[in-house]
Amino acid sequence: MFAVLLLGSVLVVLIALLFSVCFRVRRSAVHYRMCAKLPSIPRGYLADFKLSIRLATLKPKDLLPYFGKILKQYGPVVYLNILGHSYVLLNDPDDIKALLSSSQHINKGPEYTMLHPWLNKGLLTSGSLKWHSRRKLLTNTFHFQILETYIPTFNKHAQCLMRKLEKMIGNDQQVSIYPHMTLCALDMVCETIMGTELRSQEGKSVEYVQAIYTVTDIMVQRIFKFWLWNNYIFKMCKNGRNFRKSLKILHEFTENVIKKKREKLDNALVMEEISLGKKRVQSFLELLIGLSMQNPEVMTDLDIREQVDTFLFEGHDTSSITMTLTLILLGLHQDIQNSVREELYSIFGDSEREATIEDLRSMIYLDRVIKETLRLYPSVPAITRKLRQHLTIKENQIPSQAVIGVIPYLLHREEKLFPNPLAFDPDRFLPENNCSRHPYAYIPFSAGPRNCIGQKYAVNMMKTVVSAVIRQMKIETLGSMDDIVVVSQLILRPESLPGIKITRIKK
Ligand code: HEM
């Protein structure tokens, strides 16, 4: 009897396995049949293998131009088979709208899993279920009334930056502003969102910033170098060891930020008020700590750390490169810089007072300058999604499980969307020019339900810093636009930038 039962069970398991294999093979066959109908670069085992090798061996600075060439030759919809994985590049605003505006296609591509050891399932990397509840929760902490309270902190750190830049005035030295902008942005994000002073501009968190560079650099290498995909191989190689070392620095840093905040809130009464919802929640870290007290299983320490890591990274790295490039581009276009300064004089006159939220709103021309900087150099140069269902775009149907890549860096340089695309011209964003443009032709903050939660925050921060500099200093860039060399490392990073010369403006 026992033997019959055992035999029966084995049979059931075998049949289930057989069905599962058949289902997968069938699904895979359907998948590849649908992919075969998509416009593509030359196909075949050899061509696919060559493509994978090419991507793995390209220099980082050549990646975006390489995808640019592919899109020019085969686009705007191109299928790529990278080691058996289906990728589809989209470069038409209508198709991009179909993808990004959908509430179905909100799961990120597999490259984001490389971020998991660092950001775990923070807002940027989480999948649908967790993402929905967290996004709803955290959106409140970016309400415009809360953003307004951040302006004095932005001013404080902008003034600290000014004091550092002033030391570089007049001694004919070439200034590399990117490291200064990075630390300034980090101080701002940490103090506003986390409510904790970092003083990185005073030389306190250099190790953290260096660790971010190491981690993002290694992650991008891993995305394209398929032999590093395997966890064991990765762990054993030099890159894997450096990655772990830097990760330790990053996690200790954020754990410290959280610890400091917890200490600040250690006053039992304040804690009680937060958990009872009596106190107005000011920073998002307070909100998360308050929730973890009410419901420790729903908001664990790891849950808090993943959001802190995500917001510190996304918040400072994206804005610092944009502020740097805005100043460099203004230094290359003196007429545009003068127009920005005129606008600032019309707002502030000769006064040296700090900017208010109303002032920032009045900086309409500077707004266009920042938009144009983000057009040429979107801080997030590429976005991916993994389809959970088929996606229909015009005559093409892309199967579920395919990974879609949208590359704002290339989209924003399309001649038919932005004539003379390499020219720096803020007037492209005059209302009369905006209204005839497709809303998905310009997407530096992405679009749809998974767009950037920090967009307004970032614009306020960038206007505060750039206006503080341009009100008091003349920037001259020593070089040309060709000297701006950027690479895609999940976010845009400079490979080399022209230096600038700073002169004080005589009043
Ligand atoms: C120039 C500044 C910025 C740019 C260009 C930018 C751009 C973007 C883009 C394109 C995305 C979508 C990424 C994707 O789909 O993979 C995104 C997401 C995100 N950004 Fe920003 N960002 C900026 C500043 C900020 C700031 C200041 C913060 C926070 C303080 C922030 C927090 C986030 C978060 C948390 C997400 C994930 C949102 C989600 O998936 O729901 N960003 N950002």
Image (cartoon, grey):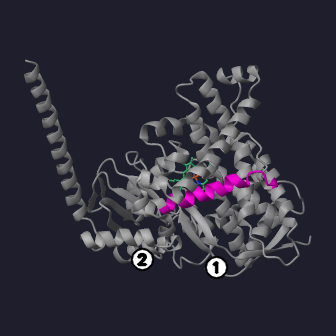
Q: SS at mark 2?
A: helix
Rendered position, 142 above or below 75: above
Residue 381: image x %, image y %?
52, 63
The residue where tag 2 is placed is 69
In reply to whether residue 417 is colored magenta, the answer given is no
Does label 2 point to a residue whose CB lies under 8 Å from ligand 1? no
Q: Main secondary structure of the magenta part?
A: helix
The residue where tag 1 is placed is 483
> Residue at 48% of width from left, 48% of height from top?
450
In reply to whether residue 219 is colored magenta, the answer given is yes
**Residue 278 visible in this rendered orientation of the protein:** yes
**Residue 100 visible in this rendered orientation of the protein:** no
Mark 1 surroundings: few (<14), some (14-19) or many (≥20) residues within 10 A? few
Left or right of 59? Residue 50 is: left
Residue 368: image x %, image y %?
65, 65
User: Depth check: 205 or 40 in front?
Assistant: 205
Q: Calculate the distance from the C-alpha at mark 2 to the C-alpha at mark 1.
A: 21 Å
Left or right of 467? Residue 142 is: left
Three-letter amino acid code of the residue under disc 1: Asp
**Residues shaded magenta:** 202-221
Left or right of 12? Residue 184 is: right
Rendered position, 153 above or below 213: above
Query: Quadrant location of residue 425?
Result: bottom right
